[in-house]
Amino acid sequence: MLSYLSNKIDAIRAKPPLASHVAFLQEQHYAHRGLHGGIDSNAPLENSMGAFEAALKAGYGIECDVQPSVDGMAMVFHDQDLKRLTGQDGLISQTRTADLKAMALNGDNGNIPTLEEVLTLVARQKPILIEIKSDVENFAPLCLSVRRALEGYRGKAAIMSFNPAIVRWFRKTAEHVICGLVISEEGSKGLRGRAKRHAAMWLAKPDFLAYDIRDLPCKFARSQRARGMPVLTWTVRTDKQKQTAKKHSDAMIFETPNG
């Protein structure tokens, strides 16, 4: 009974997108933080310009992360802390844009790029997925920076986040931007978890879902996909996960040397 009611509410509160608007999401797979790492010790670092160049050269779409500088600029970087990827102490959210742009990534991987710089590199060659990190307490300045970066961009792009309020922000202030809700069922299985996922979707009103590969196949993803909402899956690393992704999703965000 609960599933029946939830599905009815889904149809009202989170209508599936027009197929033509989201068709590009399903046209290729996406390199998680660019093509990086793997067995080659000289491979580019994650979220570096080299990693994105490698993904484009290989013909893949790109997935990247953005964190805010202290002055609100969208910087392409995964962690809150700078240490792992730069060797520097401090938090990215407490560092000025100018200092971050001048900060070298570990190895011969250039400096921390801004989202605008990455979009200039991509230059409409392939679609890009932009994950807005959900651990940002005051996310409005970061969202505004992302929106501004996308205003002059004519390529295929989408934002996504674990935080349904971030997705909702874009739904209300930038209707033209394709928005996705990132979902993991880790620690939230069962009836309460399903209710939480439905509630998040009703708030976010996403155009697609980006689902944890470790949770597939699952009833929630299957039902959303059946009613016309694309389901991407992350982070695909093994052959077994690739097979699961092929059967139960529309595209994969992968992190394996051979794609």
Image: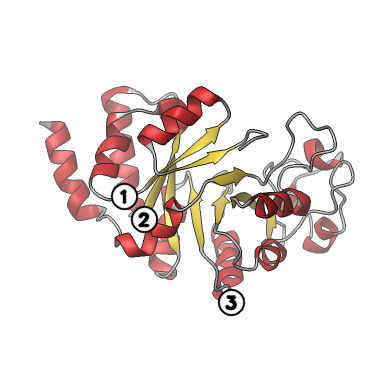
Amino acid carrying label 2: it is: Asp
Of residues 220 and 245, the one drawn nearer to the viewer in this rendering: 245
Q: Calculate the distance from the C-alpha at mark 1 to the C-alpha at mark 3.
A: 27 Å
Q: Secondary structure at mark 3?
A: loop
Q: Where residue 152 is drawn, which disc sits there? A: 3
Q: Say if mark 1 contacts mark 3, CB within 8 Å.
A: no
Q: Dot 2, how many residues are within 10 Å of its Cα: few (below 14), some (14-19), or many (20+)?
A: many
Q: Secondary structure at mark 2?
A: loop
Q: Exactly how many numbered labels are in the figure? A: 3
Which numbered disc flags the more N-terminal residue, 2 or 1? 2
Q: Say if mark 2 contacts mark 1, CB within 8 Å.
A: yes
Amino acid carrying label 3: it is: Gly
Among the 4 quarters of the image, the one containing residue 23? bottom left
Residue 53 appears in view: yes
Looking at the rendering, in which quadrant would you find the C terminus?
Answer: top right
Q: Secondary structure at mark 1?
A: loop
Amino acid carrying label 1: it is: Met
Q: Dot 3, how many residues are within 10 Å of its Cα: few (below 14), some (14-19), or many (20+)?
A: few
Residue at the spot of label 1: 229
Q: Calculate the distance from the C-alpha at mark 2 to the C-alpha at mark 1.
A: 7 Å
Residue 68 appears in view: no
Q: Where residue 207 is drawn, which disc sits there? A: 2
Horizontal and vertical percent for residue 204? 36, 52
Among the 4 quarters of the image, the one containing residue 15? bottom left
Which numbered disc flags the more N-terminal residue, 3 or 2? 3
Horizontal and vertical percent for residue 219? 27, 30
